[in-house]
Image (cartoon, rainbow, N blue to C red):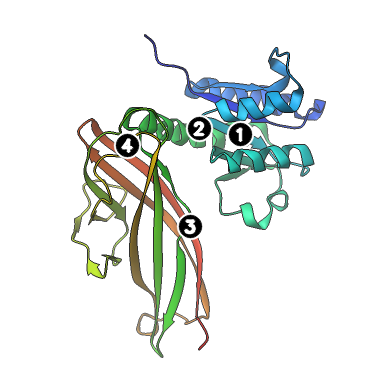
Amino acid sequence: MSEVPIFAFVLIPFAPRFDDLYELGIKAAANEVGIAAERLDEQLFTEGMMERIYRQIEAADIIVAELTGQNPNVFYEVGYAHAKEKLCILQTSEAKDIPFDLKHRRHIVHNGSIANCKAALIENLEWSKSEVENVRKSQIRVDFKQPNGILTSTPLTATASLDFKIDLYNDSTKASSEIKAIYFYSGRNWTLKQGGLVCSSTDSDITRWKRRYFLNTPIHILPPNSWAQLEFNATKVIADKMRGDVLKDSYTVFGAANLRFVTNNGVFDYALHIETEVGDIPF
């Protein structure tokens, strides 16, 4: 039996000015990546429009939402998709259309260019496709929320401390793959701890990252329709006067990381985008 195609449901205003962006940008990008993309007006249905939108959001593997002009219907539908914990890619012609509380989520600013939209969306859809395939094969869905961060300062240094709480879900009706090991990949000079104990680390075996850290798994098999949480802390000196850095009251810590699960069914990588604020806590 052939595998069910990955489906992206597109939330976009129903206005002629978005037709080319949809056909030549969004749909063309999805076709190139091998994802089936549709918007509501391409489908035949008998139920009410909102009921159909709800069902399609629930059925979709990926949501692509065009936020240009801050269309209230699209924003409402995006809120429903987030409530359903869907993998969402937000895009807009202007950054101001992305509300502050959504700016940390994966988004594209295409400046009204179909070519920019297509190129950026291909990259994002390739990542999304990999995430969906990981979940389908392993029955492990990673829900990554930005870590809470604090800043500890001395007269010479500023140190960021990030608390990670990564939710692991099995939404399927069968047990997940057996987790043999979990690794966190990042740049150099981070110290990771679990339960107050320093995590072992070594040079990365993936070119993009410098260090690989071993994490204790909270559970080895996720039963059907279950949840677990992976917790750890990461600290790093992010400013040092001896290096010529200027000490500040707050910093944005951002960058890419990778979470790798080694299982009895193979190796699964989940890309993490970190962008969080750390600041001094007044006492």
* Distance in Å between CA atoms under marks 2 and 1: 9 Å
* Distance in Å between CA atoms under marks 2 and 4: 29 Å
Residue type at mark 2: give it: Leu
| Residue density around tag 2, few if under 14, some if 14–19, many if 20 or more, within 10 Å | many
Q: Secondary structure at mark 1?
A: strand
Q: Which label sits in the foreground, 2 or 1?
A: 1
Per the rendering, the mark at residue 177 is none
Residue farthest along the right direction in this orientation: 16
Q: Secondary structure at mark 4?
A: loop
- Residue beneath disc 3: 146
Q: Secondary structure at mark 2?
A: helix
Q: Give the mark nearest the N terminus, 2 or 4.
A: 2
Q: Is residue 7 left or right of residue 49?
A: left
Q: Secondary structure at mark 3?
A: loop
- Residue beneath disc 1: 64
Quick one: 224 or 3, which is closer to the camera?
A: 224
Q: Are marks 2 and 1 in contact (CB under 8 Å)?
A: yes
Where 249 sits versus 131, above or below?
below
Q: Give the mark nearest the N terminus, 1 or 3.
A: 1
* Distance in Å between CA atoms under marks 1 and 3: 21 Å
| Residue 105 spot, x, y in % from top left | 56, 49
Quick one: 227 or 258, which is closer to the camera?
A: 227
Residue type at mark 1: give it: Val
* Distance in Å between CA atoms under marks 4 and 3: 26 Å
Q: Which label sits in the foreground, 1 or 3?
A: 3
Quick one: 200 or 188, which is closer to the camera?
A: 200
Q: Which label sits in the foreground, 2 or 3?
A: 3
* Distance in Å between CA atoms under marks 2 and 3: 21 Å
- Residue beneath disc 2: 125
| Residue 239 spot, x, y in % from top left | 41, 77
Residue type at mark 3: give it: Gln
